Amino acid sequence: MATAPIVAEGNSWFSREGLHPADWKNPNPAALYDLVIIGAGPAGLLTAYEAGRLGAKVALVERNLFGGNCLNTGCVPSKTLIRTSRLYADMRHADQYGAQPPGDVVVDFGAAMERVRRIRARIARETSITDLTAIGVDVFFGEGRFAGRAAVAVSGDTLRFERALIATGTRPTIPSIPGLTTAGYETHDTIFELTERPDRWVVLGGGPTGCELSQALCRLGSMVTLVQSEPMFLSGEERDAAQILSDAFERDGIEIRLNTEAVAVRLDGTRKLVDVVRDGDTATLVADSILVGVGETPNVDGLNLGAAGVDYDAMEGIRVDDFLTTTNANIYAAGDVCAKRRFTHFEGASSRLVVQNALCSGRQRVSALTIPWCTYTDPEIAHVGLYVREARQQEIPVKTFTVLMHDVHRAICDGEEDGFVKIHVREGTDRILGATVVARHAGEMINDISLAIQSGIGLALLGRVIRPYPTQAAAIQMAADAFNARESEDSSKRKGPPLVE
């Protein structure tokens, strides 16, 4: 299996010196820290910045690179590569926009990956160890592990604390498929260090990582087969959303294998042969490279959590309450290591919650947060709040207002008509319970609805917002208009005021 270097050769090293200086010397520990943080990903970094600005004495422990998965191997590099892949897709279909397609679209995979590393370098400049130390944060590099209920050991030093935060994130889950390790594979930890394009990929896993990278790799000129053990990929999303994406994948040329298990991998020269089973029938897929994207495993190994009195599950992560407190009342956890849904923006929100609860005697709850999410395929799939199935499980009566993107003028102009906006309200009121947006810019569009839910703005009031014409977000306006028209009709029948919360 390829391993991503801490410092790669040539331009691809992208100033990682700022993320883990080669000549760094850990400081002398303070006698007692207000807060010790293990993990310098988004949750740990943001907590350190916020706590440091409040004047707390903070120690931040990191074993590898500042920035965590998001900067180094996740959000930043993947979205950069996705943008390049979309450009290639648009060039191939230029005739749909009244333009002449280039005679021969040649993909420069090396240049695409170099851009990934260049963009990563630019954003890495915002993650400054110097800024942290300037506000009094002590930075320690090394493996942090608990040395009791109120101490962390790192590189021969002992850091004693009043409060601690575990923000160690996750790593890719590697399935126990016979022959996989011997044959070799890539994950999101390693794929962005490639410089040459494998022509044939087998992608294991139909979650967000598998779907996003399958489409990007296909658009960059590889033959891609996506293997998913469940009946549909993105199993948590609404079925019609996943179906629209499935249709888009087929148009791109991705071979989709649903209800299919990979049972063995073997080498045939330089080729990798993947044996898969569906309904008792076995087939063999041929690949130059395998991408594993079946999920994430929380980084809890080696932390000596038992000594700290912190309960955890190896697959689910650290157990926390609604205030992000662990079973040790002085130790908190935030971000992917304890989250049911793992998103970088949740790490930021949870870090602010930890600062308030751990250092400012706050009682802020995770359950009070409104957390949207988005899978950055083309079209994107974004969601916030409850799904209809969840509302029904809670016996909440729900009414859904749906607008198809092919009825939205800007989507028609853009040639981006796949998708819809669905907004769910509590029956008899305009209270927004949740929404799903499937559109090329769904990740941007969901923000309107997230703000409305967080602020208690109902769909009726959301419909009074004046938006520039034309935008794709007009679909939200159209859903609100449909609600107001229905409410007006119902109120005339009732001969009373609209039922608005």
Image (cartoon, rainbow, N blue to C red):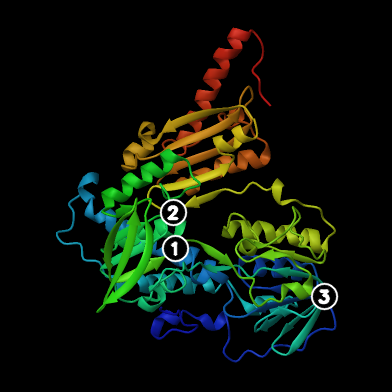
Residue identifier under label 3: 150
- Vertical arrangement, residue 456 with respect to residue 203, above or below: above
Q: Amino acid at mark 2?
A: Tyr
Q: Which residue is mark 2?
A: 376
Query: Going by the picture, which residue comes out furthest to the left?
Result: 103
Residue at 45% x, 34% y is: 475
Who's the residue at 45% across and 82% down the image?
13
Q: Which residue is mark 1?
A: 293
Residue 16 vs 76, above or below: the answer is below
The image quarter in which residue 206 lies: bottom left
Q: CA distance from mark 2 to mark 3?
A: 41 Å
* Percent x, y of residue 278: 34, 53
Q: Is residue 263 left or right of residue 19?
A: left
Q: Quadrant of the N terminus?
A: bottom left
In the foreground, 321 or 423 = 321
Q: Quadrant of the C terminus?
A: top right
Q: CA distance from mark 1 to mark 3?
A: 36 Å
Question: Residue 144 location in percent, x, y?
Answer: 69, 80
SS under mark 3 = loop
Residue at position x 32%, y 53% in the image: 256
Q: Residues within 10 Å of mark 1 (few under 14, many from 20)?
A: many
Relative to residue 96, is residue 7 drawn left or right?
Answer: right
What residue type is disc 1 on? Gly
The secondary structure type at the circle numbered 1 is loop
Amino acid beneath label 3: Ala
* Camera-nearest label, 2 or 1: 1
Contact? badges 2 and 1 (CB < 8 Å): no
Residue 125, image x and y in percent? 54, 74
